[in-house]
Image (spheres, rainbow, N blue to C red):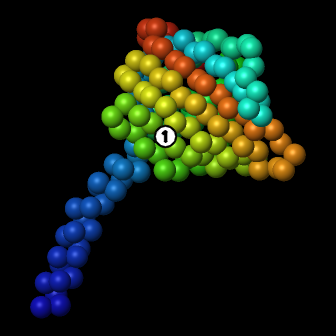
Amino acid sequence: MARKSILKMIAVIALATPFAALAAAATVDLRPGKYALTITYEVQDQRQSESRSATRCIRAKDLDNPERIFNDRIAETPKEETCSVKDLKNSGGKISYDAECSNRTVHVEGNVSATGFAVVRTVKPKASEGVSLKFTVRGTRTGDCLAGER
């Protein structure tokens, strides 16, 4: 009797393991390609009058980490910082997650479709003298990325 229970437990674990791996490797429901971005921001709850625009190539490998997509970096080669993404929810055209970085915490929520997104990114510094920021990041797919394009 105990042997049957152990075999059943092993079978359940063997069947559940692939599904757990799929859940851990959740991706963003976005089509890879070139995106036109518009970023507006608030500093300490004060709306700024300017917005920044740029294009970015979002590749298939970027879709497994929302921090590579929904950030405010526009530089040609943005500095890659490791932030740990937690509580990623991505269904029904809605996305939200939290990210823990070395010097800040981030909360992102918004809408995403296969060819565009609009998210609000709230950044809070870990240092007490830091400044809180809120970015609205909008992206619209404009076509395919060219070879070597970032």
Q: Nearer the viewer, residue 132 or 19?
A: 132
Q: Is 38 above or below relative to 45?
A: above
Q: What residue appears at the point 30 percent right and 60 percent down from the top-left corner? A: 17
Q: Nearer the viewer, residue 56 or 61?
A: 56
Q: What residue appears at the point 75 percent right and 38 percent down from the top-left corner? A: 132
Q: Position of residue 57 (x, y in %)?
A: 53, 18
Residue position for label 1: 96
Q: How many marks?
A: 1
Q: Is residue 61 visible?
A: no
Q: Secondary structure at mark 1?
A: strand
Q: What residue appears at the point 81 percent right and 38 percent down from the top-left corner? A: 131
Q: Is residue 140 left or right of residue 50?
A: left
Q: Is 70 above or below relative to 96?
A: above
Toward the front, the furthest residue is 46
Quadrant in which the N terminus is drawn: bottom left
- Within the image, what quadrant is residue 120 found in? top right
Amino acid, disc 1: Ser
Q: What residue appears at the point 21 percent right and 82 percent down from the top-left corner? A: 6
